Image: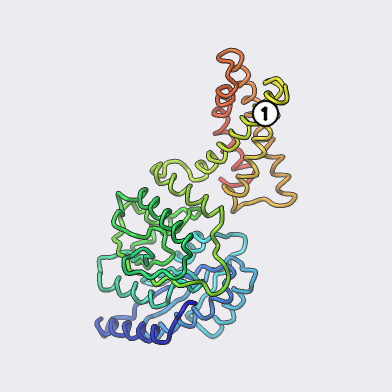
Amino acid sequence: MPVYTDIAVVEMLMALETAGKAASASAPALRVSIVLPTYNERYNIEPLLAKLLLLKQHVDLEILVVDDDSADGTAELVRKLAHHEPALRLIRRVGRAGLASAIKEGLLDATGDVAVVMDSDGQHEPASVLRAIETLQQQGDLDLVIGSRFHAQAVILGLSGRREQGSNWANRCARFSLSRAYGSLTDYMSGFFALRLDEAIPLLRAVDVNGFKFLYELLAVSKGQLRVAEIPLSFQPRIHGSSKLDLAIIWDFLISILHSLSLRILPRRAISFGLVGSTGVLVQVLLCQLLTGLGGISFERALPFAVVAAATSNYLINNVLTFRFARLRGFALLRGLLKFLLVSSLPALANVGLAIAFYENVARDSLWAQLAGIIVVFVWNYAASSRFVWNTP
């Protein structure tokens, strides 16, 4: 069970008071903004806020709860609490969602000198807020302080063995992609960090909110400009609810790594669209081989069926992964499929025509014939379907 003990809170406040006494008595209180992205965290957010609001005694505090229209009443609870707490602000987002975009919106709305981002599920201890602020103040040349789960002094109680192994693997991949700029860091995807807003605002505006982790994207776009330090985290188990980790988040991580390795030249969605397209290649090739080999159908007749099946497969996967923030459902999903097939029809005809011409005139190799057609139509399908099917630029 997570423990936010009275002793930890008292120690936090005593240390903060000591730090405050070290500053000039005439200096204005440091304004600190704490950004808490939430989605269905009703039973975790209230005890967390109670601890964080104790910081009002020592800093000019602002807490921004950025809620993605939770279905469990999280926003309603925070709204009621804010009636009695001027330091508490609610940003309720309707029609837009995502952890990275919630963090970005909260940071850009924050009015503090220093902003702290932390999870709302109770896994980050409130005492870590103090340690991050103290580190920024004591080392005046720092721009960013990261709470690291992989620091030598970190205590990890809130990850299962399997999750910890997966996090370690993902962190190694992240280090590989960012090693030139930030090779000395230990946790590139932490959900806890503190930064000086004046220095960070231009970089925050450039962060891709479709990325896997906000911190990772911030480090990637900064290209080594940020002066960074780490503090150890005491990472606690979640009390209520379950982790938001799912297939789409894992997919985002893969895209983020490839995006960084491409020097951020290729658009994220183009990379995702291309990877999904590779599954369509597999569907088309296997179905064509099945129809010609087992069904006894000629290549010329089998290919159109295989092309339509591959296009349908690409559409459904892209709807779940590449364009999930504009995901189509119900009747809109069927209408979107018809649009996608229509948008793909001309290049699909070109695909079929080019493949057959290659097969008949260059080499009677059905695999290379299909690949020649697929390569020609990729760019058209990506650009046209982004605009006309999912209505994204």
The residue located at (40%, 82%) in the rendering is 55
The residue located at (35%, 84%) in the rendering is 11
- From the viewer's perspective, is residue 67 above or below residue 272? below
Label 1 Cα neighbours within 10 Å, binned few <14 / some 14-19 / many ≥20:
some
The residue located at (43%, 68%) in the rendering is 117
Counting from the top left corner in percent of width and height, residue 90 is at: 54, 73
Q: Secondary structure at mark 1?
A: helix
Q: How is the image coloured?
A: rainbow
* Residue 220 horizontal side relative to residue 93, left or right: left
Q: Amino acid at mark 1?
A: Leu
Image quadrant in which you'd find residue 278: top right
- State the residue in front, 330 or 195: 330
- From the viewer's perspective, is residue 150 above or below residue 270? below
Disc tally is 1
- State the residue in front, 118 or 183: 183
- State the residue in front, 59 or 126: 126
Which residue is farthest right?
Answer: 331
Counting from the top left corner in percent of width and height, residue 27 is at: 28, 81
- State the residue in front, 384 or 250: 250
Residue 221 shows in this picture:
no
Residue with the mark numbered 1: 290
- From the viewer's perspective, is residue 164 above or below residue 26? above
Counting from the top left corner in percent of width and height, residue 280 is at: 60, 36
Which residue is farthest top?
Answer: 361
* Residue 73 horizontal side relative to residue 62, left or right: right
* Residue 110 horizontal side relative to residue 337, left or right: left
Image quadrant where one finds the C terminus:
top right
Residue 288 shows in this picture:
yes
